[in-house]
Amino acid sequence: MKTLVVCYSRTGSTHALGHRIAGALDAPIEDIADRVERRGIVGYLRSGRDAWFGHVPEILPSDHDPGEYDLVVIGTPVWNWSLSGPARAYLKRHASRLPRVAFFCTMGGSGSERVFRQMEKAAGRAPVATFARTQAQLAAPDLDKAVEEFASLVRARFEKAA
Ligand SMILES: Cc1cc2nc3c(=O)[nH]c(=O)nc-3n(C[C@H](O)[C@H](O)[C@H](O)COP(=O)(O)O)c2cc1C
């Protein structure tokens, strides 16, 4: 199962979780990047508004071709109960080249189910598995165990579907 982990992260939480997932799945990790100023209160408000309205920012070219993988695991923060703009842009750009997918997200407290539905729609396919973590769960001692369980589920579902 040749796997790629891709994520967008504004303040590092989603990247940190993606890094653990990549380790558990023995996969490279790629960060999605755009040129929108997202720092400070103005960047925060812009990010939330754009996510809510489903705007698609321009993102920088990808290092890895998702079409060369068997599975791509895609991660995003939850912004205003919505998929972040850069992750939405990645899914839309690569929808026709995506193999099987799995999704993960990080959040303060809520919005993951809506975000996973939006990711499914943007990717044009259902995920083999999803994984959501709140900030509190990211700091909990069982995080590695939860990541291992997600990785095992992804492997099992992938093999079952293959
Ligand atoms: C603009 C904006 C909107 C957010 N909206 C939500 C939300 O609707 N629900 C939630 O649980 N957390 C929300 N958060 C918190 C982030 O999802 C959370 O801090 C996340 O882990 C940040 O990931 P990152 O460090 O990878 O950027 C929001 C954060 C930002 C910046």
Image: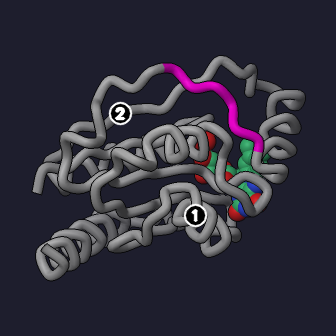
- First-in-chain label (1 vs 2): 2
Q: Is residue 45 left or right of residue 61?
A: right
> Which residue matches tag 1?
121
Q: Position of residue 58 (x, y in %)?
A: 64, 25
Q: Is residue 20 left or right of residue 116?
A: left
Q: Are marks 1 and 2 in contact (CB under 8 Å)?
A: no
Task: Inspect this view and state whether residue 61 appears.
Answer: yes
Which scheme is used to colour this image of the protein?
Answer: one colour
- Identify the residue shown where x is 13% and y is 73%: 162
Label 1: which secondary element: helix
Q: Nearer the viewer, mark 1 or mark 2?
A: 1
Q: Quadrant of residue 25?
A: bottom left
Cα gap from disc 1 to disc 2, whole angstroms: 22 Å
Which kind of residue does numbered mark 1 sit on? Answer: Lys
Which kind of residue does numbered mark 2 sit on? Answer: Glu
Which label is found at residue 30? 2
- Identify the residue shown where x is 81% and y is 45%: 48
Q: Is residue 61 above or below residue 65?
A: above
In the foreground, 38 or 158: 158
Q: Position of residue 53 (x, y in %)?
A: 84, 50
Which image quarter is the N terminus in?
A: bottom left
Q: Position of residue 114 (x, y in %)?
A: 67, 71
Q: Which residues are magenta?
A: 55-60
Magenta stretch, overall SS: loop
As for residue 49 lying within the magenta part, the answer is: no
Decide: few, some or many residues near mark 2? Use Cα within 10 Å; few <14, some 14-19, many ≥20.
some
In the foreground, 114 or 91: 91
Label 2: which secondary element: strand
